Image (tube, rainbow, N blue to C red):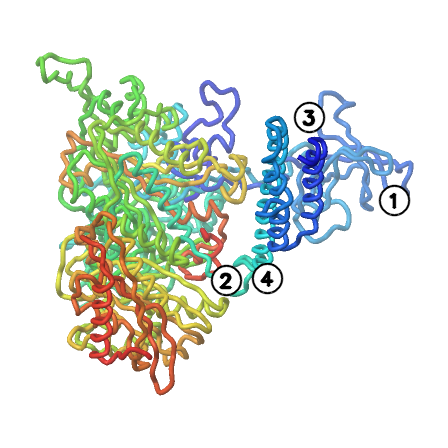
Amino acid sequence: MSENLQEVVAKILKYSEQFVLELKSANTKAQVLDLKAKYVGKDGLVTVIMKGLKSATVEEKREIGKKSNECKDQIEQMSKNALEELEHQEINRTLEENWIDISFRDSIRSKAACTSGYHPVTMIQREVEDIFSSMGFDILDGPYLEDDYHNFEALNIPKDHPARDMQDTFWFKDMTHLLRTHTSTIQVRGMEKYTPPFKFVGPGKVFRCERTDASHEFVFHQIEGMMVDKDISVANLIYFLKILLSEIFKKDVEVRLRPGFFPFVEPGFEMDIKCLICGGKGCAVCKYGGWVELVPCGLVHPNVLKYGKIDTSIYKGFAFGLGLDRLVMMKYAIDDIRLIHAGDLRFISQFASI
Amino acid sequence: MLISIDWIKDFVDLDNIKDKDKSITKKEIQDKVTITTAEVEEVNETVSELFIKVRVVEIKSIKRHPDAEKLNLVTFSLGSEFGSGNESELKEVVCGAANVRVGLKVPYAPLGSKFPDGLVLEAKKIRGVVSCGMLCSSKELGLGENSNGLLELPEQTKVGITFAEYLGEKSDVILNIDNKSLTHRPDLWGHFGMAREIAAMFETPLKNRFSNEWEKKMLAKIPAGSSSASGASGASKSPIKIYFEGESAGLSYYGLSVSGVKIAESPEWMKRRLKNVGLRAINNIVDISNYVMLELGIPLHIFDRDLINDDKVIIRRVGGSENILFKTLDEIERELIPTDTIIANSKKPLVVAGIMGGLESGVNDNTTNIFIEVANWKAALIRRTSTRLGLRTESSQRYEKSLDSMLLKRNLLRTLELVLEFCPTAKVEGGIEYAGEKGDLEKAPLILETSAESISKQLGQQITLERMKEIFEALEFQVGEKGREKNQEKGQEKGSVLLEITVPSFRATKDIDCEADLVEEIGRMIGYDTIKLVAPTSTIKTTRLSYTKEFHRQIQDFFVLHGKCLEIFTYPLVGERTLKDALWDKLRDATSPHYLNQDLVLINALSKDHDRMRPSLIPSLLEAASLNQKYYDNFRLFEIGRFFDRETTKTGDNTFNNAFVDEKNMLGLALFDKQENMFIEAANLIENLFKYCKLKVDLKEEIARLANKYIPVNWPGKHPKEFLNIMALGKIVGGIVTINPFIYKNFKMKGNLTIAVVDLSLFEESEGKQRTKINYKPIAKYPSATFDCTVIAESKIYVAQILDVLKKMKMNELVDCKIVDIFPMNNNKKAVTVRNIFLDELQTLESERIKKCEDQVVATLAKSGFPLKV
């Protein structure tokens, strides 16, 4: 060996440093590859040193071999890193060239893909249906076009009963068919379908021949509920409705029951809830009374059960009704009930899901 | 109905309720009546609170305000009844009025008074001197426009009285009760009945001035006694006899003749009471009839007896040949028909029974002889006539609720009592006359059986027998014990006592007829708020949404989450105008004979815009689109709504068929864009909807032999080409159509509108039994080969036809083929690239075999007129 051990080791270290320096100015893949070849290629500077080891002593071989291998590994690793870095930069350059405006989203577009969503009554109705469903109630419906029997007679409202005045009825020419004035008709339909014990609710549209204004509409939505079983009591009814209302309003509500006259229940009640807006102190919503009339209800009148062919000596039942539009209007502070059926997207889109 | 608390106090000592040291407040009475009996909508004081606060004072001394030239410091006295000593009864206020002088009597408003303009008097310094209240002008009290100085009261006015007392106005509290909550309570349409409720709810005795003794005393004033009822003839003969003639609304009719009355004004107290409950005072006799009705809840009528001009009144129906125009008291001529009941003399009608008297025989200023009628009528018949005439009177409102004949005599005697009180010279002629339907006064009392246990069970709360008895008796039900209930198993007598409850006649006319009614009496009197809540015990049962419900929810979910649609509701009712705008009247197709739903027109629609059930959702969707295109360049909306048609075929019982009409659910979809055509989008949504609902559907072009009744072929609103039938279950269930701009002018709109409708009833009836199943297959073990080829086709040929050719080939290896691209060419041609997938599930496809498949595809296409593009 012409050079001594120290000189060779120093040379290797020098190559190593030199490579690092030169790599810094390599800007293309080709330059990096050339540089790599210059040092660790077939006739590269480091390769040559390794080849020249044949004449060295075992000790020299071990020392120089170790150093030059280290140098080679380092150069290869750095070349690889440099190449990957260059490739990444190259891809990114292309990507940047294909620039898109990421701010131009639907939210700022004039002609956006349409918003979509459920009608607010659908949302409330589903929520109420799901609450009932979770308590084991079936969900039924019936026709809008009813006959006198289902809307009145079977609900203990015979002809010439003054209670018929309470509900302004739309009649068809034959004077026996009408548009249902309440979802209580679904009670009659339900009793025709089931044998006790049973429980079901019936949501749907109802019709009243009433002058319309911001708080009166001739088509609106109710949900009727009926439960028939042995030993049903007033205490059960209150318990049940209190749970229902707490679920709907998602907080404990204070309720009160007072007598209310509906021919199909006896005893009959109006259930009021303590005004949620003012907490009972009195405000415009509760007409300064502190209570809001919400659920007409009662124990099913024995005559109604008899019409439904139910043995009143064994079974009793409770029934109640709830105005869905009222709930929707309370929830979103909607000021005009006529928007419900207007088909106006300026209204509907405010409840959009997407 | 308005209830005067002052009047109630004639019967209930509201100022001395047990366990209460104070009298009952307005709020307490409102809440209590609402909770136990009927909704009190409002409570009002008849005299403003200001007039009760303001008092009459006498000015004692005047001195100049130390710091203001025009102001005086005035000392005055509140009178000896107020204040504890000479010193403290004197008060000092600052006053700027010019007419202030010693000795003057003026109204004084203490601190806290609230004036009509909203001002509340507070203690404040006026130029350094505290004024404790204010001396008032008439303007300040809201009495007049004049504010020139203090209101000077007459010298003799008593110092210390309230201004209300000075004005002679007695303060009263008026309950405004919701009439609807009294529909079932005929007994509460008078103050005495309401007093009974109030006495019961406050657990205090009812002062019944209409006792048997009172009745005896009153009867003693009738020299002839009850002539007809007793059969005896007395001192003088009754000038008017009563006859029932044939079937009528009449139940019972009492009459009494009185002579020598003098028409005058009623006394102040009566005028005030009538005014407070909303009635105008007219004269003593008319006022008495109103007063007695409002007190006892049963109407009556007083005739000028001389104008009856006969010796009899007849209760009968209107005769067939009679002049049926009759002028009632309100001076309106009304047409009476043969089912109406009247009270007539031998020649002509005098009164429309139970509704309103006639103008000709009414009491007037010259009346001296009267005939008092107290009667009861059949509720349903009175209601029918009153509804027909559109005449709801105080009287008919009461009769239609079923009144109690047993109380008629009391009404008559009370009327007589007041007549004799107001006209001491008046003299009864003859006796009480009576006619009535057989047995009307001899009805057996209604007795209901129950037990304390049964009532407690239905309320879900234990209530003692003693408490129940108290309540029943306060409400004048009689409680009898019938022995003990037998224990069914052991045959032994159990603890619960069987009760026999005798219902008072005035509650038995309609209101109370079964045990449940008794439960209500107890429940409302103990207060429903005292009932402890108990969960129902019921058997466990699983519940699921019905298929229809689930199906509707799926549709809504699909359109909201996938279809980018907004859900709308439209009225199930439309008007002829909208149907005509939608050119629905042009449908003279055999499949839709009732194209305008003329049979489904309401007789009492609110407006012509919504007077009939809609035959389809399409007109409603057109209206909604027309409205929304004013505000949006593009929108997508859908509705699940009902439509009504009069098909004769009846299907299963799941839809809402009755003999009258087919009422079915329909899905309506409307896609609108100002520029772009929305047809493909709509068709895609419909196809995907059915996929999502796991239902098979086929969209088919117009088929000549199958009529689409949802979008009929001759509907002018239909686009000539952009139309597809929606086929499922082997039937046409709907259609997709682009709306023909021809119709736009009727809806004042511009743009592209595509509508789809689907009759959901067929799917609902089969409850989803036809749902498609997911068919899993193992993933192919061998690779597939893809072959794209581009062919040439006529430009107006549907590309689906190209694929149809390939499908018909039935080549086993061809597992899929789809269109990749279409690009237009010259000469009305287009190039269509088709992608074919070849696969053999059992082995790898060799390249030779693939080549054979490709050749076959190309040859078949060429043979069918789609040559390979070279």
Label disc, if present, on residue A112 of the rendered structure? 2
Q: Could you give the CA–CA distance between mark 2 and mark 4, rounded to whole angstroms?
A: 26 Å
Determine which residue is flagged by label 3. Answer: B82
Residue at mark 4: chain: A
Instruction: Point out the frontmost of discs 3 and 4.
Output: 4
Which amino acid, mark 2? Ala
Q: Could you give the CA–CA distance between mark 2 and mark 3, rounded to whole angstroms?
A: 79 Å
Label disc, if present, on residue B70 of the rendered structure? 1
Residue at mark 1: chain: B
Say above or below: A262 vs B636: above
Residue B501 x/y as whole percent: 21, 26
Which amino acid, mark 1? Lys
Which amino acid, mark 3? Phe
Q: In which quarter of the image is residue B822?
A: bottom left
Q: What residue is rendered at 46% in x and 72% in y?
A: B674
Return the residue nearer the eye: B17 or A24: A24
Q: In which quarter of the image is residue B555?
A: bottom left
Q: Which residue lies furthest to the bottom in this view?
A: B827
Q: What residue is rendered at 50% in x and 48% in y?
A: A333
Q: Could you give the CA–CA distance between mark 1 and mark 2, rounded to whole angstroms?
A: 74 Å
Tag 1, which secondary structure? loop
| 10 Å crowding of disc 2: few (<14), some (14-19), many (20+) | few
Return the residue nearer the eye: B856 or A156: B856
Determine which residue is flagged by label 4. Answer: A97
Residue B235 x/y as whole percent: 24, 41
Residue B1 x/y as whole percent: 41, 44
Return the residue nearer the eye: B844 or B487: B844
| 10 Å crowding of disc 4: few (<14), some (14-19), many (20+) | few
| 10 Å crowding of disc 1: few (<14), some (14-19), many (20+) | few
Q: What residue is rendered at 47% in x and 61% in y?
A: A113
